[in-house]
C-alpha cells in the first residue's frame, strides 16, 4: 500500500504541475505538453506502469479490507470504539472506492476522448469544454474534497508503514502531510473554477 | 449514585450469550467500575445467583488483567486508563452503562466478561525476549545507553498487555502490543543482536493467532491505558522491512 | 524440635561461594529426567522457572492467572537495591548487609542476608542484559535513588514501574524457555493441595479455574513462589487475588510457618476513603526522596494546607530523626503517622492521614521534573482522590503492604518438608522483622536466579527417587481431600458471601493485630477470629457451579485459609513479648516510643508447626546468632 501510495502521490504532483499550465490559456504549454505525452513512444510503457500502480494499490487496499473483515465476529453493541479514529482513516476504503469510480469517468472524459479520437485533439479545448458545464465542475470539486480526505489518511500512513514516522520524524511528516493533503487537492480544485469564471482563455 | 447496567452474560465459550439488565444502587462516586461490579455481585451471590465473571487483579492499572468495553469504549469512554482506574464520578447519576467483553477473533470469550488473551503470551514466546541465560550477563554499566534511548524504550516497555489495542482496533490488530516489545528491544543495545529474528517471529505469530492487519487508524494509541505511541508501530514496520530486505 | 538452618561455616563473605562448590551437581544429560514444579510466576517463580529450565531440568510452571505476567510483582513501583556503589557514596556488600540486618531489627539470619547482598549486583547485570530499561543518566550509565533505611543511593529504578519491568524481564526469560520446551506453563490453574510421598514433596493438586476440574501433577521437587499474605487484612496494597492458600496447604502438610506476625505496614498509601473500597493503593516510597511529611501543629486546623505558614507546620519525621529525616525505615514512618493521627493531628475528612508535600521540590526543580520522575504516581493519585498533587500536598496513611513472615526455610530455601522449596515473599528468610524499601524485588530475583538453581540441583543430585504412581494412596488422597474441600464450601449453603467474612476478618486484624498490638487486644482478636470461622462454616454462601469459572469458589477457599492464617498470626504476635520492626507491642517500647527488643529471650525465628484441625500449633525455634552485626538499639536519629 505504502509504496504504491507513494508512487501515486508522486504522480498526482506531476499531474497537478502539468495542469497548472492550463492557467496560461489556450495555445499555452499545456496543449503542447499533452501532445507530447500523447505521441512520444516512451510514455506508453510508463502509462502501463501507472495503470499497474493504480491497480496494485486498489487490489491491496481491497485485500487488506477483506482480510480484516470477520476479525471481530460479533460487533460491539454500543458503537463507541471508532470515535477515537480520524474520520479520514476510518473512511479510507470508501474514499478510495469513490476515487476509483471517478477515475473511470475521468479517463473516459479525457484520456479515451483524446487518445482514441482518431485525430489530434487540443487538450486545452477538451478541458475547457468539460469545465463549461457547472454539473461537471461540482462533481469534480466534490471529488477533490474526497481526494484530500483520502490523502489526509494516506500520506502519513505511507510513512508509518515504511517505518519512517518514528518519534523523531512524526511531527515533520505530519507537517509535510498538510501540504500534500491540503495543497494538492486545492491546486486541482482551483483549475475548473478559474476556467469557468474566465480566468484562463 | 445509582446506575442501570446492561451486562454481557455468556455461560462458556460455546454459549451464544446475551445482555442482562441489573441495577447498581448506592455506589460511591469514588468507587471504580470494578468496585461497582463487586457490589452487584455480592447481591447476586446472596440471592444464590451466578455472579458476573470478570478478570481483574491489581486494581491499580498495572497488571493488565482487567478489560471491559464500557458504553462502547475499550476501558471506558475516556482515554488512557484501565477499567479498574475508571471511577464512577466520571458518569452521571442514573446513567445506563453497557458492559461488554473485549471482542476480537483471537480473544475467545471464556465466560461473561472474561476473555482468553493467551494469544499475547504466545506472541511473546515467539520472540519477545533477549536470549541471555542466567549468569551470563556482563557488568551492567559496561554498555552505555543514552538517556534518550532508555527513555524511549521505557515508553514502549510500559505496555501492560491488556489487549485494549486489539479490542479497539477496527481491524482487530495487535500491532501496538507487538510493536511495544519489538521497539523496546530494538532501541536497546542489548536487544539488537536478535532484532531481525524477533520482528519476523513475533509478526508471524501475530498473524497465526488471527489478528488483523494494521491500516494505520491509530485507534490503539488513543485507547492504550499507558499511551504507548504508534511511532513504535512505525519502528516495528522498519524492523520488519529491515529483517526482510536488509543484509544479514 | 530444633531446627537446622544448614548454614555453612567459615567467614561469612566466603560462605556462599564455598557452599556453591560443596553442593552436588546433576550431570547435564540427566537433568531432563527431573521434573520441578513451580507454583507462582512472580519475580521469584518466573526467574526460578527460567533458570532451572536453562540448566536442562523439566519445569512445570503454574499460575492462577492466565498469563505469567499478571503476577503481583508487576505492581512494585520504587526500585531494586544493589550494592554497586556506582555513585561513590561508600556502598559495599558489607554496607547493604549491615543496613538489611539492622533494618530488619536483628531478626534475620546473617548468612542469608549476606548472600542476598552478595548477589545483588549480579541481579542488575542480569536484568540489564534482558533489556530492562532502567533509568539512565545523560552519559548513559545507570541512575540510582535513595530509599528508606539507607543513607546512600543504591536503588535502581525504571520510573515508577520497576516491578513491572523486572517482572517482564523474568517473564521474557520464562517465555523463551516455554518456547524452547524447557517449561510447560499451566495458566488459570490454582494449587489446592501439596502431595507428600514418603515425607518428600512430590507434586501438587490443582484446580482448573475455567472448568473446575481437579488434576494431579507429579515431580521431583516443588517450589512455592506464591507471594505474601497481606490480604489477611482485607484492605492492603496487594492485588485482589493474592492469597495464602498454597502456604497454608503446605503448612497443613508439615511445612513450618515462621514469624507470621512480621507484617509490614507501608507509610505512604492513599488513605481509606470509604466502605466501597476493595483495595488500597501504594504511593512509592521513592516519593519520600522529594516529599516532606508534615501535619499542622494545631489540632483541627482545617485551613487549606498552602495557607498554613511554615512555622505552624510540624515536619515530625525531620524533627524526630534529624539524620534520616523523611527517609526513616517504613515501620518507623508508619508508626509515627499513626501516633500523630491518634493524637488528633491527622488531616483530611477522616483525620486519618498526613501530608506528603512536594512544594519544595517543585519550586526547586519545576513541575516537569517532578512529572518525569513520578508522573505515573502523581496521575494515579489524582485519578483516585480527585486532588491534584502538583497543587496541594498528597494525603497519605499507612497500609498493609508486605509480609516478612512465611514458610520457614533453611539456607537452601528448603522447607521442613524435603523437596519443598519456598522463594520470594512466600518464605520468611531475609528481611527479619522489617523489610527495607526496594529489597523485595532484590530478594525475589536473588532466590530465583541465583540461589534455587544451585540448591535444587543439590537436592535432586543427593536424593534417590522412587517412582510415584498416579494412583498411589498419597496422590489419590490429596486429590480426594481437595474435592472434599470444595464440596464442603459449596455445601454450607448459608446466606453470606465470602467477601463479607473477609471484611470482618480484616477489620479485626487491622484494629487489633495491626500497627500497635497489645496482649489484651490480641487475645480478643483470637477469640473473634474463632467466631468468624464458626460463622463462616455456618453461613457461607457460594453461588454458581463448582464445574465452571466461579470467582466465588476461589474467593471462599482463600478466605477460609486467611481465617486460619489470621489466627496463627495473632498467636505469633501474642507469643512474641517484645517489639521489633513491623511487630510493635505497646507493652514493649522505649520512652521515646521506639521498638524495644528482647534479645535475651526472643532472638529466634518462631516456626509454627501444624498439629491437627483445632489443635494449638507447636512452636519451634530457629535460634539466631549474630557474629558480624552485633544487635544494638536501632537508631535513625
Image (cartoon, rainbow, N blue to C red):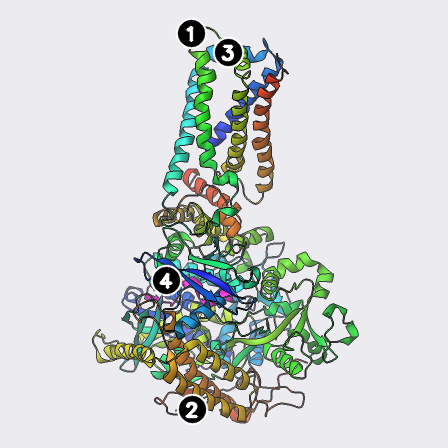
C572 horizontally vs A22: left or right: left
Q: Residue A36 carries which label?
A: 3
Question: What is the residue that sits farthest to the front in this orientation?
Answer: B94
Q: Does the magenta stretch include residue C423?
A: no
> Do the residues under discs 1 and 3 have CB atoms within 8 angstroms?
no
Local SS, label 3: helix
Question: What is the residue that sits farthest to the top in this orientation?
Answer: A119
Residue C534 in picture, x, y percent from top left:
39, 87
Q: Mark 1 lies on which chain?
A: A
Can I make out residue C244 in this image? no
Q: Which mark is residue A118?
A: 1
Say which residue label 4 marks: C54
Magenta span of residues: C53-75
- Residue at 35% x, 77% y: name it: C420
- Residue at 52% x, 21% y: name it: A135
Measure the alpha-carbon separation of dots 2 and 4: 39 Å
Mark earlier in primary sequence (2, 4): 4
Residue B43 in picture, x, y percent from top left:
43, 72
> Do the residues under discs 4 and 3 have CB atoms within 8 angstroms?
no
> Do the residues under discs 2 and 4 have CB atoms within 8 angstroms?
no
> Do the residues under discs 2 and 1 have CB atoms within 8 angstroms?
no
Measure the alpha-carbon separation of dots 2 and 3: 102 Å
Label 1 crowd bin: few (<14), some (14–19), many (20+), radius 10 Å: few
Q: Which mark is residue C619?
A: 2
Amino acid at each position: 500500500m505504502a509504496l504504491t501510495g507513494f508512487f501515486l502521490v508522486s504522480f498526482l504532483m506531476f499531474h497537478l504541475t502539468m495542469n497548472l499550465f492550463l492557467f496560461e490559456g489556450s495555445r499555452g504549454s499545456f496543449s503542447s505538453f499533452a501532445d507530447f505525452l500523447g505521441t512520444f513512444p516512451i510514455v506508453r510503457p510508463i502509462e502501463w506502469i501507472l495503470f499497474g500502480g493504480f491497480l496494485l494499490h486498489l487490489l491491496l487496499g481491497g485485500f487488506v479490507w477483506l482480510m480484516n473483515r470477520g476479525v471481530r465476529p460479533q460487533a460491539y453493541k454500543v458503537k463507541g470504539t471508532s470515535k477515537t479514529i480520524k474520520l479520514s482513516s476510518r473512511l479510507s476504503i470508501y474514499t478510495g472506492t469513490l476515487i476509483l469510480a471517478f477515475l473511470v469517468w475521468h479517463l473516459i472524459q479525457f484520456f479515451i476522448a483524446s487518445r482514441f479520437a482518431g485525430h489530434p485533439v487540443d487538450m486545452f479545448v477538451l478541458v475547457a469544454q468539460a469545465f463549461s458545464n457547472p454539473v461537471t465542475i461540482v462533481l469534480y470539486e466534490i471529488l477533490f474534497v474526497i481526494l484530500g480526505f483520502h490523502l489526509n489518511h494516506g500520506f502519513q500512513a505511507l510513512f508509518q508503514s515504511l517505518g519512517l514516522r518514528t518519534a523523531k520524524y512524526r511531527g515533520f511528516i505530519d507537517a509535510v502531510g498538510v501540504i500534500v493533503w491540503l495543497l494538492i487537492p486545492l491546486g486541482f480544485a482551483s483549475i475548473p473554477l478559474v476556467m469557468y469564471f474566465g480566468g484562463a482563455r | 449514585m445509582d446506575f442501570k447496567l446492561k451486562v454481557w452474560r455468556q455461560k462458556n465459550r460455546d454459549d451464544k450469550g446475551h445482555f442482562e439488565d441489573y441495577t447498581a444502587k448506592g455506589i460511591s462516586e469514588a468507587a471504580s467500575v470494578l468496585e461497582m461490579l463487586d457490589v452487584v455481585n455480592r447481591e447476586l451471590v446472596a440471592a444464590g445467583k451466578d455472579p458476573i465473571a470478570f478478570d481483574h487483579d491489581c486494581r491499580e492499572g498495572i497488571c493488565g488483567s482487567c478489560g471491559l468495553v464500557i458504553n462502547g469504549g475499550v476501558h471506558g469512554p475516556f482515554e488512557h486508563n484501565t477499567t479498574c482506574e475508571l471511577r464512577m464520578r466520571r458518569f452521571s447519576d442514573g446513567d445506563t452503562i453497557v458492559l461488554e467483553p473485549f471482542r476480537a477473533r483471537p480473544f475467545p470469550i471464556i465466560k461473561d466478561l472474561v476473555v482468553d488473551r493467551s494469544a499475547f503470551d504466545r506472541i511473546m514466546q515467539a520472540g519477545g525476549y533477549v536470549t541471555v541465560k542466567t549468569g551470563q550477563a556482563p557488568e551492567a554499566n559496561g554498555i552505555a545507553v543514552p538517556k534518550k534511548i532508555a527513555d524511549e524504550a521505557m515508553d514502549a516497555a510500559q505496555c501492560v498487555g491488556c489487549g485494549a489495542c486489539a479490542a479497539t482496533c477496527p481491524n482487530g490488530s495487535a500491532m501496538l502490543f507487538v510493536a511495544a516489545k519489538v521497539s523496546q528491544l530494538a532501541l536497546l543495545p542489548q536487544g539488537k543482536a536478535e532484532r531481525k529474528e524477533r520482528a519476523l517471529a513475533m509478526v508471524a505469530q501475530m498473524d497465526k493467532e488471527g489478528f488483523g492487519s494494521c491500516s494505520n487508524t491509530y485507534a490503539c494509541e488513543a485507547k492504550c491505558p499507558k499511551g504507548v505511541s504508534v511511532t513504535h508501530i512505525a519502528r516495528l514496520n522498519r524492523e520488519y522491512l529491515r529483517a526482510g530486505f536488509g543484509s544479514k | 524440635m530444633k531446627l537446622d538452618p544448614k548454614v555453612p561455616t567459615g567467614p561469612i563473605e566466603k560462605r556462599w561461594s564455598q557452599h556453591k562448590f560443596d553442593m552436588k551437581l546433576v550431570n547435564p544429560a540427566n537433568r531432563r529426567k527431573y521434573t520441578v514444579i513451580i507454583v507462582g510466576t512472580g519475580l521469584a517463580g518466573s526467574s526460578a522457572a527460567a533458570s532451572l529450565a536453562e540448566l536442562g531440568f523439566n519445569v512445570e510452571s503454574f499460575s492462577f492467572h492466565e498469563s505469567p505476567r499478571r503476577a503481583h510483582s508487576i505492581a512494585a513501583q520504587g526500585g531494586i537495591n544493589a550494592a554497586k556503589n556506582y555513585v561513590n557514596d561508600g556502598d559495599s556488600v558489607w554496607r547493604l548487609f549491615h543496613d538489611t540486618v539492622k533494618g530488619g531489627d536483628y531478626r534475620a539470619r546473617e548468612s542469608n542476608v549476606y548472600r542476598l547482598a552478595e548477589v545483588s549486583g549480579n541481579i542488575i547485570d542480569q536484568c540489564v542484559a534482558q533489556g530492562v530499561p532502567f533509568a539512565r543518566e545523560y552519559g548513559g550509565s545507570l541512575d540510582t535513588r535513595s530509599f528508606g533505611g539507607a543513607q546512600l543511593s543504591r536503588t535502581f529504578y525504571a520510573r515508577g514501574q520497576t516491578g513491572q519491568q523486572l517482572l517482564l524481564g523474568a517473564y521474557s526469560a520464562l517465555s523463551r524457555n516455554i518456547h524452547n520446551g524447557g517449561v510447560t506453563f499451566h495458566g488459570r490453574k490454582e494449587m489446592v493441595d501439596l502431595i507428600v510421598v514418603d515425607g518428600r514433596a512430590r507434586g501438587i493438586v490443582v484446580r482448573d479455574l475455567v472448568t473446575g476440574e481437579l488434576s494431579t501433577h507429579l515431580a521431583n521437587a516443588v517450589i512455592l513462589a506464591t507471594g505474601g499474605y497481606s490480604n489477611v487484612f482485607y484492605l492492603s496494597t496487594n492485588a485482589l487475588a493474592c492469597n495464602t492458600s498454597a502456604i497454608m496447604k503446605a503448612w497443613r502438610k508439615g511445612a513450618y510457618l515462621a514469624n507470621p506476625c512480621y507484617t509490614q505496614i507501608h507509610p505512604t498509601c492513599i488513605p481509606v476513603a470509604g466502605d466501597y473500597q476493595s483495595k488500597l493503593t501504594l504511593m512509592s516510597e521513592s516519593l519520600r526522596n522529594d516529599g516532606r511529611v508534615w501535619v499542622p501543629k494545631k489540632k483541627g486546623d482545617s485551613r487549606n494546607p498552602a495557607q498554613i505558614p511554615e512555622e505552624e507546620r510540624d515536619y515530625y519525621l525531620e524533627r524526630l530523626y534529624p539524620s534520616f529525616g523523611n527517609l526513616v525505615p517504613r515501620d518507623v514512618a508508619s508508626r509515627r503517622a499513626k501516633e500523630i493521627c491518634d493524637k488528633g493531628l491527622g488531616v483530611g475528612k477522616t483525620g486519618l492521614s498526613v501530608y506528603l508535600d512536594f512544594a519544595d521540590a517543585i519550586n526547586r526543580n519545576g513541575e516537569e521534573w517532578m512529572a518525569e520522575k513520578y508522573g505515573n504516581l502523581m496521575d494515579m493519585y489524582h485519578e483516585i482522590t480527585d486532588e491534584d498533587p502538583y497543587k496541594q500536598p498528597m494525603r497519605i496513611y499507612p497500609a498493609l503492604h508486605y509480609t516478612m513472615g512465611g514458610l520457614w526455610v533453611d539456607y537452601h530455601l528448603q522447607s521442613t518438608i524435603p523437596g519443598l522449596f519456598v522463594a520470594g515473599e512466600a518464605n520468611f528468610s531475609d528481611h527479619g522483622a522489617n523489610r527495607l524499601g526496594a529489597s523485595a524485588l532484590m530478594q525475589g530475583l536473588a532466590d530465583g536466579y541465583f540461589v534455587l538453581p544451585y540448591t535444587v540441583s543439590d537436592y535432586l543430585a543427593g536424593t534417590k527417587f522412587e517412582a510415584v504412581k498416579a494412583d498411589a494412596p498419597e496422590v489419590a488422597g490429596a486429590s480426594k481431600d481437595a474435592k472434599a474441600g470444595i464440596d464442603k464450601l459449596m455445601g454450607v449453603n448459608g446466606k453470606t458471601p465470602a467477601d463479607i467474612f473477609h471484611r470482618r476478618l480484616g477489620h479485626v486484624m487491622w484494629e487489633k493485630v495491626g500497627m500497635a498490638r497489645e496482649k489484651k487486644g490480641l487475645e480478643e482478636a483470637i477469640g473473634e477470629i474463632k467466631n468468624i470461622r464458626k460463622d463462616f462454616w455456618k453461613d457461607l454462601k457460594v453461588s454458581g457451579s463448582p464445574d465452571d469459572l466461579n470467582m466465588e469458589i476461589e474467593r471462599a477457599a482463600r478466605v477460609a485459609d486467611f481465617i486460619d492464617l489470621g489466627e496463627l498470626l495473632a498467636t505469633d504476635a501474642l507469643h512474641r513479648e517484645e517489639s521489633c520492626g513491623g511487630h510493635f507491642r505497646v507493652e514493649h517500647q522505649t520512652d521515646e516510643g521506639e521498638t524495644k527488643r528482647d534479645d535475651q529471650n526472643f532472638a529466634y525465628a518462631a516456626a509454627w508447626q501444624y498439629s491437627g484441625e483445632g489443635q494449638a500449633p507447636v512452636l519451634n525455634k530457629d535460634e539466631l546468632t549474630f557474629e558480624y552485626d552485633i544487635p544494638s538499639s536501632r537508631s535513625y536519629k
